[in-house]
Image (cartoon, rainbow, N blue to C red):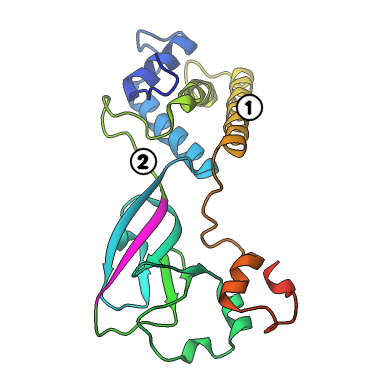
Amino acid sequence: MALNSKWTRTQHRAAARREIMDSGTKWVTDAQLNTYLDDWEYILQHRHELVWNITTFTSTGSTTLTLTDVATGILRPGFLYWEGTKLVPRTQDELSAYQSNWRSVNTTTRPIVMYSPAPEVIAVWPPVSTASEYETIWEYATVHAFASDADAQILPGWTRYSSTPYLAMRVYANNGPLHDLSKAERYRAMFENASQRIARTMRRYWPKRSPALRPASAYELDILAPRGQFGDKSTLWI
């Protein structure tokens, strides 16, 4: 099997059953392993954001956009393009430092900033006019759950072997006939080591990920506020 081959849910379960020596499904049900598999994929995706998606959404002029309206399965929004222009991610505190009356500015057809006023909500600034529709493009880290036994993982194929120690850990940690906390701890260490290898691989070979709504950098500050407006160097954006 090629290193980049993605396992199906059936293949993940089979590997885990060989590890815990339960090939006859005597001690652990398929439903349990299916739940653990969804957790495994979510944990790795949440930690490393290995899989990203892109979608288009037509805004009807609303300044705030709910993520569930844009797409399902958004783990974290990345860059947002508004009518072809990439918006700069900011926090509300940064907007207040940049322009104290930012909440009362006039509407526009081309905002320059995106920020998150609440969970699951993205807002743009300056506020846009409601007189027309706007085409937006969203990049986001996505979440996934196995839909069937034939459904393949969304994570890269080289991460597939990390599922076996995670499933074994969950089985041995669960109250049941195979309950063994010492084994659960050993498999937990194996899974954490696999997760660290994934992080090292990404740092060495993957391009830098989208900063999205993380603290702004000096480069982004220069776009929003040219040098000199806050002095030669502002510590607010470091």
Helix, strand, or loop for circle 2? loop
Indicate left or right for 112 with 232 as reference: left
Q: Residue at point 47% right, 91% down? A: 104
Q: Earlier in the sequence, mark 2 or mark 1?
A: 2
Q: Which mark is residue 193?
A: 1
How far across and down, in percent of the image, does residue 100 sit?
59, 88
Q: Main secondary structure of the magenta part?
A: strand
Q: Is residue 227 above or below residue 106?
A: above
How far across and down, in percent of the image, does residue 42 sit?
45, 40
Q: Residue at point 62% right, 73% down? A: 222
Residue 215 in sight in this render: yes
Q: Residue at point 29% right, 78% down? A: 61
Q: Which residue is mark 2?
A: 144
Where does the magenta region start and end? Answer: 133-140
**Is residue 138 covered in magenta?**
yes
What type is the residue that disc 2 sits on? His
Indicate left or right for 212 with 37 as reference: right
Number of labels in the image equals 2
Q: Residues within 10 Å of mark 2 (few under 14, many from 20)?
A: some
Quarter of the image with the C terminus is bottom right
What type is the residue that disc 1 sits on? Asn
* Distance CA(mark 2)–CA(mark 1): 23 Å
The quarter of the picture where residue 145 lies is top left
